[in-house]
Image (cartoon, rainbow, N blue to C red):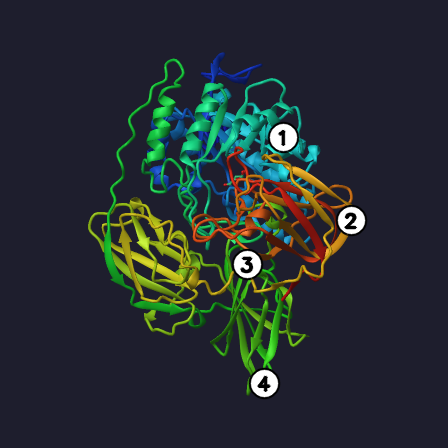
């Protein structure tokens, strides 16, 4: 009897191990070896040039993973690079979910079947225009947590997460018969900190998790030294000037193969700014330059795809990212080969390694159009409220244990005359109603949290419907608590006694809605329609007549929409459609101009309608007051693209920082700045928290996204550029930063517009002003 019981236990244990095998890939003997040699990467001991491209499994419909990987192979890539997003894999503390779009192990297996190697970027922080840079919202439940540091309240869960990544993806390393060549630690940490031990702890956590392939770290050229550790192979990220960037890399990597960790063919889009398209001739030229010099690279993005759901993040200071992540990549959002795809393929075909060949691209997936459908049903938010929770003063979304979506904050305001309603802050938009009637809007983009309420004859219900867009994915801004930041005051008196309704915009909420016949004045509402489709195929939902919100089809959340653009369509993967009835649900905070929806055969990615922006100007109008101000510095910048640190004779104090450019090195009327950092007396960068652009005399917002916020978004690939399209205003050019509060400034760091000496906008002479009264509101 005992013998049978032991036998049974062994059988059961083995069966259980098999189960895990299915989630956790079974380790196989290594067939190949990969290492970092003195001069080259070595695959099976042979020189190996990494021609890599970035594709995010989360941003590609799972049904199309193989198609996109075949496209990547046909373009000439031999490796794909993939971020993991911690917040997608661990949506609740300790609850790991590798299903559906998060099944990265399956993505890697398909890559291997398609003869592609994999470079893994598990984070814990990833950036990537993804909600909170991939960090889980629930970390914010600890008010004073120090993200991306050795704060144990951050590091312990991060280590747990990496351990889980090791359990699931460790067996897919080349050392265990899989396709994974290298694993990245953190992401561009040099931008954020200099704590070597933090990077060391993460490195060790990956080793402890079972990763035995080379571990590396990526940074842009001018912060490579920050956080640099010799036991982490460094790669450099850049969008142009390979020569200069690799020269910077050689300063930390005197010997060894040179690799560009992110080479940008395009760029991402944010709502309300023009669609980005890359400079293709320069992209091809720089790629060939790297091929000629046997340098390795990873194209970011080779295929951008779509940020489905509510996962799109926000660029700093607060520029919400579009759900389309087409990125003007060689492989378009719907997986189509673009001109750039064929040019890249042709270029790579000239630099193939011995034994390599280029397969034909797979056929394009079927594309359909769907005739316009009238949307006849709606479920107004105010008629579909869940059970409320009460709190004396408003708390943030995380404190109500809610991850994403909207929150309705309700209280009663007394009868009385016109009054000023003000919140400390609202992340991100507060739609204000009095007894259900629109009364105004609070807008984080320009820190406008004040509303004049009209007179009230009786105690009135005040509702603030807060829409949270993505959490900022870069810099200190990732500490992005959503919802209302208390206090809320009425004529200075704090309002208490709130009822709060959670509207997480998830399946549960959708399934509980009561739809009724549509009516014009529905206010913020969910709308529903049925699309009958004979033969499903990819299509692009036309949302041009809708306002602002989120759209689903057959329960799949396609992402956000906003009528200001630049994108006006939502990509619908064919496999998510049924032959027959398809349910479309549209959550619209503003309400449609015309409640119709159709499917188009082409995406609309570049149609701006700034006239539809509820913030008429994306910055409150102010008057510049320089005449009575005394400059703290008058000087000239050196020519070229190098970053320049400038120190004042004596520190200056003030809430506003103004750079007045007086001339350009090329004598043209344009000014441009890629990055501005302000320095304290010890030369340390001041935190950007609360910074906004108070005033700018000119910015190109039509032909390209030259908006002034680009000078403080932390990304050197984006830059402020004065108008050059419809107008070319001449010098002087003024840019005024509002630091939110008075600060002591001892200098600043100026990062010129990237690129060769032929690019315009390189400022020569300038003056600096610091003070509390440089602008008048
Ligand atoms: C950085 C980050 C990436 C991404 C790009 C911009 O370099 O590392 O994750 O955010 O910028 O697309």
- Distance (Cα) linking label 1 and label 4: 61 Å
Q: Of marks 2 and 4, which one's residue comes earlier in the chain?
A: 4
Q: Secondary structure at mark 3?
A: helix
- Residue 386 x/y as whole percent: 48, 67
Distance CA(mark 2)–CA(mark 4): 50 Å
Disc 1 beta carbon < 8 A from ligand 1? Answer: no
* Residue named by callout 2: 651
* In the depicted structure, whether residue 277 falls above or below residue 14: below
Q: CA distance from mark 1 to mark 2?
A: 39 Å
Q: Is residue 437 above or below residue 486?
A: below
Locate residue 227 relative to residue 577 in the image: left or right. right
Circle 1 sits on which residue?
Answer: 203
Mark 3 to mark 1: distance in Å? 37 Å
Residue extending farthest to the top is 45
| Residue designated by label 4 | 415
Q: Nearer the viewer, residue 222 or 422?
A: 222
The alpha-carbon separation of the residues under discs 3 and 4 comes to 31 Å
Q: What residue is pinned by disc 3?
A: 445
**Number of other residues with Cα within 10 Å of mark 2, as a class: few under 14, some 14 to 19, many 20 or more:** some
Q: Residue at x 62, y 52 (%)?
A: 140
């Amino acid at each position: 009897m005992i013998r049978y019981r032991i036998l049974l236990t062994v059988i059961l244990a083995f069966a259980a191990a098999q189960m895990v095998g299915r989630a956790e890939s079974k380790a196989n003997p290594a067939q190949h070896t990969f290492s970092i040699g003195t001069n080259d990467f070595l695959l099976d001991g042979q020189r190996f040039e990494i021609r890599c491209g970035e594709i995010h499994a989360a941003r590609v419909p799972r049904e199309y993973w193989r198609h996109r990987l075949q496209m990547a192979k046909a373009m000439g890539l031999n490796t794909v690079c993939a971020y993991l997003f911690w917040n997608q894999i661990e949506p609740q503390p300790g609850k790991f979910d590798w299903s559906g779009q998060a099944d990265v192990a399956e993505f890697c297996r398909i890559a291997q079947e398609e003869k592609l190697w994999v470079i893994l970027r598990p984070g814990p922080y990833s950036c990537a225009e993804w909600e909170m840079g991939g960090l889980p919202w629930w970390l914010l439940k600890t008010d004073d947590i120090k993200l991306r540091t050795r704060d144990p309240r951050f590091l312990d869960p991060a280590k747990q997460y990496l351990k889980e990544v090791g359990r699931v993806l460790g067996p897919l390393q080349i050392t265990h018969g899989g396709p994974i060549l290298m694993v990245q630690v953190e992401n561009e940490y040099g931008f954020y900190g200099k704590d070597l031990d933090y990077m060391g702890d993460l490195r060790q956590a990956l080793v402890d998790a079972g990763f035995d392939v080379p571990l590396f770290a990526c940074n842009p050229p001018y912060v490579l030294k920050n956080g640099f550790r010799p036991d982490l192979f460094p790669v450099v990220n850049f969008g142009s000037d390979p020569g200069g960037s690799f020269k910077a890399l050689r300063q930390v990597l005197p010997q060894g193969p040179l690799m560009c960790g992110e080479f940008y063919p395009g760029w991402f889009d944010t709502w309300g700014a023009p669609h980005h398209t890359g400079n293709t001739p320069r992209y091809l030229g720089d790629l060939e330059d790297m091929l000629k010099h046997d340098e390795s690279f990873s194209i970011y993005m080779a295929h951008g795809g779509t940020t489905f759901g509510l996962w799109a993040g926000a660029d700093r200071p607060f520029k919400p990212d579009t759900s389309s992540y087409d990125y003007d990549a060689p492989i378009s959002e719907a997986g189509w080969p673009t001109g750039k795809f064929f040019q890249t393929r042709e270029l790579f075909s000239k630099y193939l390694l011995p034994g390599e060949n280029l397969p034909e691209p797979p056929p394009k997936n079927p594309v359909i159009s769907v005739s316009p459908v009238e949307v006849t049903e709606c479920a107004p938010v105010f008629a579909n409220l869940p059970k409320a929770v009460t709190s004396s003063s408003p708390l943030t979304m995380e404190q109500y244990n809610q991850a994403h979506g909207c929150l309705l904050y309700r209280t009663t305001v007394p009868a009385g005359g016109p009054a000023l309603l003000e919140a400390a802050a609202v992340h991100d938009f507060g739609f204000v109603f009095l007894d259900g009637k629109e009364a105004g809007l609070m807008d984080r983009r320009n820190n406008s949290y004040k509303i004049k309420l009209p007179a009230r004859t009786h105690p009135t219900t005040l509702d603030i419907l807060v829409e949270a867009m993505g959490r900022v994915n870069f810099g200190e801004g990732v500490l992005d608590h959503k919802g209302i930041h208390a206090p809320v005051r009425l004529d200075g008196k704090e309002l208490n006694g709130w009822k709060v309704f959670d509207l997480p915009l998830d399946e549960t909420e959708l399934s509980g809605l009561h739809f009724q016949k549509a009516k014009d004045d529905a206010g913020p509402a969910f709308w529903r329609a049925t699309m009958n489709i004979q033969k499903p195929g990819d299509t692009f939902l036309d949302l041009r007549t809708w306002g602002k919100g989120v759209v689903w089809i057959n329960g799949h959340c396609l992402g956000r929409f906003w009528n200001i653009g630049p994108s006006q369509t939502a990509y619908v993967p064919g496999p998510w459609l049924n032959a027959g009835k398809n349910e479309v649900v549209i959550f619209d905070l503003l309400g449609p101009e015309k409640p119709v929806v159709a499917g188009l055969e082409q995406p609309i990615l570049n149609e701006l309608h700034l006239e539809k922006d509820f913030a008429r100007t994306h910055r409150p109008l102010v008057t510049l007051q320089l005449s009575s101000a005394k400059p703290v510095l008058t000087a000239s910048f050196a020519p070229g693209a190098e970053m320049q640190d400038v120190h004042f004779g004596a520190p200056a104090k003030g809430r506003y920082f103004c750079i007045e450019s007086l001339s350009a090195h090329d004598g043209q009327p344009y000014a441009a700045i890629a990055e501005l950092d302000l320095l304290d007396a010890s030369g340390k960068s001041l935190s950007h928290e609360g910074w906004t652009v108070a005033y700018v005399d000119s910015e190109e917002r039509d032909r390209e996204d030259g908006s002034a916020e680009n000078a403080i978004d932390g990304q050197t690939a984006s830059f402020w550029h004065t108008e050059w399209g419809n107008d070319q205003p001449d010098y002087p050019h003024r840019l005024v930063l509002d630091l939110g509060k008075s600060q002591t400034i001892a200098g600043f760091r100026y990062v010129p517009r990237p690129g060769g000496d032929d690019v315009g906008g390189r400022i020569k002479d300038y003056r600096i002003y610091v003070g509390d009264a440089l602008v008048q509101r």
